[in-house]
Image (cartoon, grey):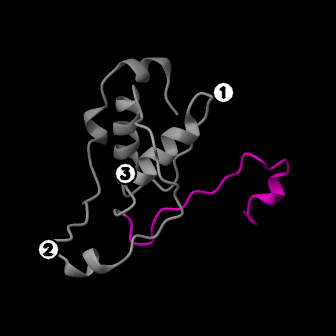
Amino acid sequence: IFSDNEWRTPPLSTLATKRAQPNPLSDPGLSTRPLQHNLRAQTTRLIGREWAVERLRQLLGCEEVRLVTLVGTGGSGKTRLAIHIANELVGTFAQGVWFVALAGLSNPAQVPMS
């Protein structure tokens, strides 16, 4: 998802559009509705990934972006980063935020059943 240059440079201003955050103060229904998710609680802070978190916020805030895929070598922090941003944005999406673990799958045909 990020080139070497993108890891070292600030976000592009053209991607600065963010989806409006729900405001429980202006919409009382939001504050009483339980958040829909299956995310596990994070017991540690995410350190040193501020730029990646901001980039993901921007991408997930763009109406025309329907899918974001994190790729990289095993153990590089893709899952941790995804769960962090999902926890951060859990109240942003009306249908909730859902984590689907695909690491244990060996056959692509298993993906739809997951």
Q: Residue at x 45, y 67 (%)?
A: 96
- The image quarter in which residue 21 lies: bottom left
Q: Which residue is mark 1?
A: 73
Q: Residue furthest left?
A: 26
Instruction: Tell me, yes or no, whether the highlighted magenta stretch contains residue 101.
Output: yes
Q: Which residue is mark 2?
A: 26
Q: Residue at x 40, y 60 (%)?
A: 90
Q: Amino acid at mark 2?
A: Ser
Are circles 1 and 2 on residues that touch, CB within 8 Å?
A: no
Foreground of the two, 33 or 102: 33
The spot of residue 111 in percent (x, y) is 75, 58
Q: Residue at x 30, y 32 (%)?
A: 12
Which span of residues is magenta-colored? 93-114
Q: Residue at x 41, y 42 (%)?
A: 56
Q: Earlier in the sequence, mark 2 or mark 3?
A: 2
User: In which quadrant of the rendered image does the C terminus lie?
Assistant: bottom right
By secondary structure, the bulk of the magenta-drawn segment is best described as loop
At label 3, counting other C-alpha atoms closer than 10 Å, the crowd grade (few under 14, some 14-19, many 20 or more) is few
Q: Earlier in the sequence, mark 1 or mark 3?
A: 1
**Residue 35: which numbered mark, if any?**
none
Q: Which residue is mark 3?
A: 88
Q: CA distance from mark 1 to mark 3?
A: 24 Å
**As displayed, is residue 69 above or below residue 7?**
below
Q: Secondary structure at mark 2?
A: loop
Nearer mark to the viewer, of 1 and 3 = 3
At label 1, counting other C-alpha atoms closer than 10 Å, the crowd grade (few under 14, some 14-19, many 20 or more) is few
The spot of residue 57 in percent (x, y) is 36, 45
Q: Amino acid at mark 1?
A: Thr
Q: Amino acid at mark 3?
A: Glu
The spot of residue 72 in percent (x, y) is 62, 29
Tally of marks: 3
